[in-house]
Amino acid sequence: RDEIIKMTEESLKQEDTDEYELRYVNWNDFKKAIGRLENPIDVAIVYLLRMGVNGGRFKELINLKSSDIDLKKKTIKFENRTIEIDDEVCDILKEAIEQDKYTVMLHNESSTPYASEFEFNMACPYLIKQKPKKNNNYGLNPYTFSGITNRIFRITNEMDIGATAMNLLQSYAVDRLIEHEKEIGKKLSTSEAFDFFKSIGCKGSFDAVRLRIYLDSRN
C-alpha cells in the first residue's frame, strides 16, 4: 500500500495529470449545475451522490425506498447505516418522492429540443423510479447497476460540469477529510488519509487520495 501511495504522489507531480479524472466539485458549482436538471428525481440522485450515498455499485441508491426517508425526523435509513439530512435535502427528496411524470429532452432533425414525458408507476416503492416496461415489471423493480450507471451518466452530462459519479463521491470524501482534520487540529499524512477514506466507506480510497494530493499541489 505504501509503495502504491508513493507512486501516486510521484505521478501527480507530472504536468499531464488528468484533471477530468481528479475533478473536485465544490458545493457552489454543484448547486448551480443542478439548476439545469428538469426532473426532481435526477436532482435527488446526484445530490445523494455528492453526499456520499453509494454503498458500492450504487446499491444504496438503487435499493433506497421512499419509506426509508423520514422527512419529519430528517433521516435516511440504509441497510447498514442511517444518516441525518437538512431541510434543503428534505425538500429535494420530497419533490422526488412526489414526482409522477418524467420529462425527457429530445432533439428533432433540426436539433431543436422538445420535451417528451412518460408516467411513472407510482406503486413502485423505490425512490429512483424508471420508465415502466415489461422487462422491469412495469416500473416496479429497482434499477440494475448498468441501468443506474447509464442514467447517472446522462444526468451528469446534462449538468455540464465535466464530473462523473466517482468525482461526486470523491468530492464528498475529501470534504469529510477536511472536516476531520479541522476537528483534530492537524493535517493527515497521505497514508493516514488513505486509512481515513477506508474508515468512512470510500470505495475509491486510492482515487480519493490522489484527488487530495492533487488539490494540495494546487494550493
Image (tube, helix red, strand yellow):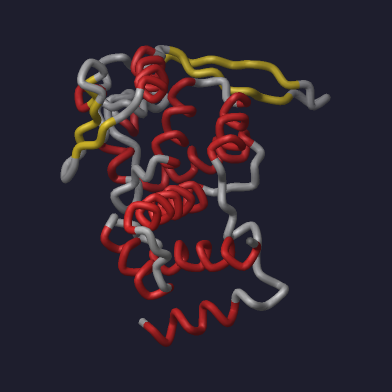
Q: Nearer the viewer, residue 72 or 40?
A: 72
The quadrant the C terminus occupies is bottom right
Residue 78 % position (x, y): 21, 38
Q: Nearer the viewer, residue 215 or 7?
A: 215
Q: Is residue 39 above or below residue 161?
A: above
Residue 32 % position (x, y): 62, 29
Q: Is residue 10 above or below residue 106?
A: below
Asked if residue 65 lies left or right of residue 22, the reply is left
Q: Residue at x 34, y 52 (%)?
A: 183
Q: Is residue 29 above or below residue 193?
A: above
Q: Is residue 8 above or below residue 102?
A: below
**Total of numbered circles in the picture?**
0
Quarter of image, res 52: top left
Residue at the right extreme, as displayed: 110
Q: Residue at x 16, y 45 (%)?
A: 80
Residue 135 % position (x, y): 34, 33
Residue at the bottom extreme, as displayed: 3
Residue 103 % position (x, y): 54, 18
The quadrant the N terminus occupies is bottom left
Asked if residue 116 lies left or right of residue 7, the reply is right
Asked if residue 66 lies left or right of residue 107, the reply is left
Quarter of image, res 72: top left
Q: Residue at x 41, y 22 (%)?
A: 88
Residue at the front extreme, as displayed: 185
